[in-house]
Image: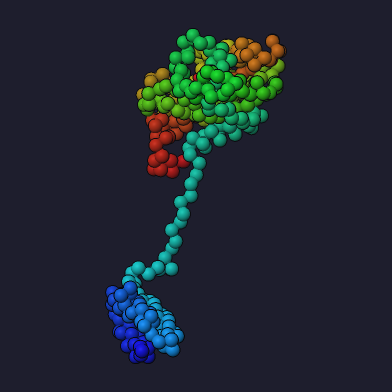
Amino acid sequence: MWNFDDIQQKALQEIDACRDLDEAEALRVKYLGRKGLLPEIFASLSQASPEEKPLIGKGANQLRARITEALEGIKKRVQEETFDPTQRIDVTLPGVAPVLGHKHILTQIIDDICQIFVGLGFVVQEGPEMETEFHNFSALNIPVDHPSRDAFDTFYLESKDPGNPGRHLLLRSHTSPGQICIMEKYAPPLAVVIPGKVYRPDAVDASHSFMFYQIEGLLVDEHVKFSDLKGLLTVFCKRFFGEEIIMRFRPHFFPFTEPSAEVDISCYICKGKGCSVCGRKGWLEILGCGMVNPKVFSAVNYPKGKYTGLAFGLGVERMAMLKYGIHDIRIFFENDNRFLNQF
Ligand code: PHE
């Protein structure tokens, strides 16, 4: 028969004398481990007489509970004693402020530009980034063999639409297909701006990217005139760049507008005198625009001759670069906070 009182007294003394966690662990192994005393006591049950069995069982269970409890207590004490005060949390220190995010510079520019047009009575709509060949080209009077497709022709995807087998989809190369989406859905009068990403087969350099942002504008009604286009864009440019900005409309060609123009602003660096940023011209191109080509209206089945419209498309990165004197388009997409946090 085991003398539980003696065993317990000795064990508790030993545990109480522990000075570190290693010693406590050694005692745990000695008493509770697989080859320790308690398993031995439980094993002896099989040889014990029927009268002894309950006594041994009860004594062993109590012993195990006491030793476990004592070991836990000693571990806690040892940990407290060996605690490194330099690791302690100093609650009087000022807290670490969480970093607050903010809108990306391009998102801010898009918001600013759209807001100016909303103030002029336009609504903001978005079109799909993946477009049909019809929306991106044909409906905009860019036929299959037209040379201006070259600069746009890429990023094709095979249509999985069972209703459109074999028809090609593509990542839109400009936001102008957004014009078609809107006109297919709504009848005039309408005035919308359509911001979004566009994709081009351009090699990346300081002024080109395979992906960038545009904002399209479209206004259709009866009696819309070229002077409305000029007036609208003049108000916009002055609000965006400042009253002192000088603009010029330069004749240009786009298949989906007739007549067409490009708009230049006086160079923000040299104020029109000529410098390296503007290529000594004194002018910087900011957008394409024109009066909606009647062929576009017939592509969306608007009644012939009833409406006229104006349209324009501007590059968002370009506007940001001009406004803030940024020289490299790649910096917008590199996620470098030293740049982004300035805005
Ligand atoms: N879609 C033209 C481009 O990407 C810009 C444009 C839009 C020109 C609307 C005229 C009218 O270059």
Q: Residue furthest top?
A: 145
Quadrant of image for the N terminus: bottom left
Task: Establish if 278 lies above or below 32.
Answer: above
Side of 25 where 248 appears, left or right: right
Quarter of the image holding residue 310?
top right
**Looking at the image, which is closer to me, 59 or 260?**
59
Side of 112 where 284 appears, left or right: left
**Looking at the image, which is closer to me, 166 or 340?**
166
The residue lying at 39 percent from left, 43 percent from top is: 338
The residue lying at 38 percent from left, 85 percent from top is: 48
Residue 164 in view of the camera = yes
Number of numbered callouts drawn: 0
Task: Establish if 295 lies above or below 201.
Answer: above
Quarter of the image holding residue 2?
bottom left
Counting from the top left corner in percent of width and height, residue 190 is at 67, 24
Task: Establish if 135 lies above or below 26.
Answer: above
Residue 136 in view of the camera = no
Counting from the top left corner in percent of width and height, residue 245 is at 51, 26
Quarter of the image holding residue 91?
bottom left
> Coloring scheme of the render?
rainbow
The residue lying at 40 percent from left, 43 percent from top is: 337
Side of 319 where 217 appears, left or right: right
The residue lying at 35 percent from left, 85 percent from top is: 12
**Looking at the image, which is closer to me, 220 or 155?**
155
